[in-house]
Image (cartoon, grey):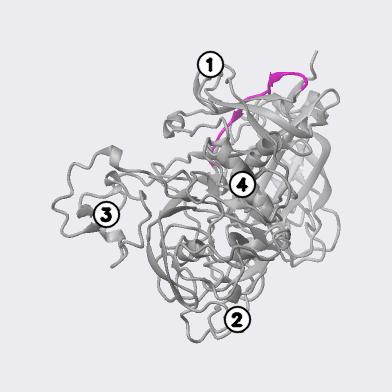
Amino acid sequence: MPPSLTAETLTIDRQITGIDHRFTPPDPVSGNPGLVQDVMVIDSAALTNVDLSQYQTFKLRLFAPAGQKLVANHGDGYRSSVNLNFVAGKDTVSHSESAVLEFENFMGAMPTRESSNFFICDGSNGIIFQANELYPGGGTGFTAMSYSFTPAYNPANSPKNFEQNAAIIGCPMCFSYETTAATDPGPLVSLAEDGPIPQLLNYQGRIARGTPAVNFEGPGQFKFALVNTDGTETFWSNDGTSNAGSEPAAAVTLQVTKGLYSVLLGDILLPHMTAIPMSVFTHGDVRLRVWFNDGTNGSQLLTSDHRIAAVGYAMMADNVKDGAITGAKLAAGAVGAVHITAGAVGGTQLAPDLTASGTLTAGTFQGSGAGLTGIPASAVVPAPPGMVLIPAGTFTMGNSVAADTDITDAVPVSVTLSAYYLAVNEVTLSQWQAVYYWATSNGYTFTNAGAGKGANHPVHSVNWYDCAKWCNARSEMENLTPCYTVSGVTYKTGESNDVACNWTASGYRLPSEAEWEKAARGGLVGQRFPWGDTITQDLANYYGNTSYSYDLGPNGYNPIGSVGGTSPATSPVGSFAANGYGINDMAGNVLEWCWDWYGTPYAGGSNPRGPTSGSVRVRRGGSWSYFAGNCRAAHRSHGSPGFDFNYMGFRPARSSVP
C-alpha cells in the first residue's frame, strides 16, 4: 500500500481592521478590579463551517494594514499567555494544547517564535486572542503574525465544526498603529461586489507521506481541479480534461521544499496550465482538488478539497470592467501614443461617452479616423502573454540631462530600432523554476539554481550564462526557435563566451542595451527616470539617499522591500506604477542583464548590439540596494558574465515576427 497523503495545514488570512478600546468595570461582589483591554478587530469573512478535524494544523495569520505596523507600547520581556475561544457548535470543549505564535515579516527586534498555552471553549464572541507582554522590551511592531495549533493532538476534544460570524483579537496591552511608508496610505477600502474577479490564484500547500507523516522533498507532479462542494462537478482543471471531479490527464511539475510548494493557478506560462475563466467564480462554493505523484507511489488524491476564497494580498486581476473607463476618469492628455499599451483598452471597456477613431496607416493612428472601419480580426496580432510590443522608431539614447555630469560613458546618440517585444515584469522565482526544472530534465545545465524572496518576487543570483540558457529552454518549451547557439548548436551547457544570437529567431532572448533603454524611457524624451526627472520610494524600490538633488527619499531601504528582511530587499514585481509602455520595475528592484558586451562609446545607428567581444556584459536599471543615481535610464553598469548576486536578475525580449 502506498503511504497516505494528507492536506496538513489549513491557513486562514485576515486583515486587522481596527483597534477597539474596551473596559470591564470592577465587580464589588467578587472583588475583581476590572480590566483595561485593547482589542484588535479582524475581518471575519468566510470563517463559517470550517471543519477543523480535516486538518493536522490550523493556522490563523493576521496582517496589519498596508504601509503600517502594529506597535505594542507595553512589555516586560515575559513569555505570552494566549487564550483562543471558538464557537464550536454542538462540540462544547475545554482543554489545553501545544501552540506556536509566529511573527512574520517583522520590523524591529522581536522573537520569531514563542510557545504558548492554547484553550478552546464554547462561547459567543468568536475568536478571542489574549496575550500578556506579547513583545519583549516593548515599542516594537509587526506587519504580519500567525497563530498555529494542532487540533489532532487531542482528537477526542477537537472541535468538528468551526462556526462563527465575528472575530476579535484581544490583548491586555496598549496597541497603536505606526505608519512605515513615506506617506500615510489613508483608510482601508474594499472592492465592490461586482469588481473584477482574479484570474490567477496564488496557492501554497504542504505534502507529507507515511505514518508518522514526513515532509516530502524534491520535484513532484501535481494536478489541480476547481470543483463544487461535493466534488461532482468540475469548473476548471490545469489541463482542461477533468470531468465531474475526475483526475486531469497532464501534470504540472513543482518543486517541494520541506513539504511546502507554491503555484500560481491559471498561469499559462507553466506547462500544462490553462487560464481560469471568470465564470468559475460565479459559483458560491469553489474548492481546490489536488492530486500528487511523488515519482514512486503513483498519482494520489490529497484530502480534503480546500475551499478557495480571494484575499487581497494574493489577488491578481487582468480585466477592466466593461464601461468602466469614462471621460471623467481621464486626465487631460492622459490618452496618447505613449500612454496606452498595445491591446490594453478594448471597445467594451469604454463608457458610452468615449469613442475610438482614427485611420490605421503603417501601424499608427492618423487623421480624423473616418476611414477606420472593417478591420478583420486576422489583421490584429496580439503581443505574447506577459509581454508588450515596443514599436519601431528612432530615439535618443544616452544622457541628455546637462546637470548629470557624473555619467561619462553615455554620450547622446540617435538610435533606430525595429519593433520587438519585452516582458512586462522581471522574471519571477515561480517563472524561473517552472522553466529551470523542465530544462534540467532536458539536457540543460546551470551554474546557479536561482533564488527569490517569494514566488512573485524577481529571481536573483543568476549569471548571464544562466539567463541565456533559460531563454533557450523556455523557447523550446513553447515550441519556438531558440536564439542562442555555440558553433551552430543550441546553447544548453557550460559558460561559453562564443555564444551567438539569431536576432530573427522566434524565441526568447536578452534585450540589447539599446532595446532596454528605449523600453525603460517609456516614450519620454530627455528625462532621468521612466516617469520624469525626480524619484521617490513611492515610484521604485531602491536605497534612498536624499543627498542627491533628484532623490526625494526617504533615506534607507524601501519599506516595501524590507518586509521580511533587508537582504535581499526585493519587492513583488509590478508593485509600482508602469511606465508609458506599460512595463514595470525598469528602475530599481533588481539589476537586469542585457545581451551586449560593455564598450564605450556605444554605437548609434540601426539596431546596435554592442561590441563583438569583451570581458564584461552590460547590466541596467539599478536595484533595491543601489542609490537613485544607478536607477537613471541613461546609467550604465557592467559585470563579468559569470558573476551572480542577490541584486541581479533579468527580463526576456523577443523579436517582432509577423
- The disc, 1 or 4, on the residue closer to the chain's N-terminal end is 1
Which quadrant is the N terminus positioned in?
A: top right
- The disc, 4 or 2, on the residue closer to the chain's N-terminal end is 4
**Whole-Å distance between the Cαs marked 1 and 2?**
60 Å
Please tell me whether residue 304 belongs to the stretch shown in magenta: yes
Residue numbers of the magenta segment: 296-310
Is any part of residue 165 visible from this angle? no
Q: Residue 362 has which mark?
A: 3
Q: Position of residue 406 (x, y in %)?
A: 59, 84
Give amino acid for label 4: Thr
Q: Which residue is at the front of the view, 451 or 22? A: 451
Q: Residue at x 46, y 45 (%)?
A: 317
Side of 29 where 236 appears, left or right: left
Give amino acid for label 1: Thr
Q: Residue at x 61, y 31 (%)?
A: 163
Q: Which residue is mark 1?
A: 232
Which quadrant is the C terminus positioned in?
A: top left
Q: Residue 546 has which mark?
A: 2
- The disc, 1 or 2, on the residue closer to the chain's N-terminal end is 1
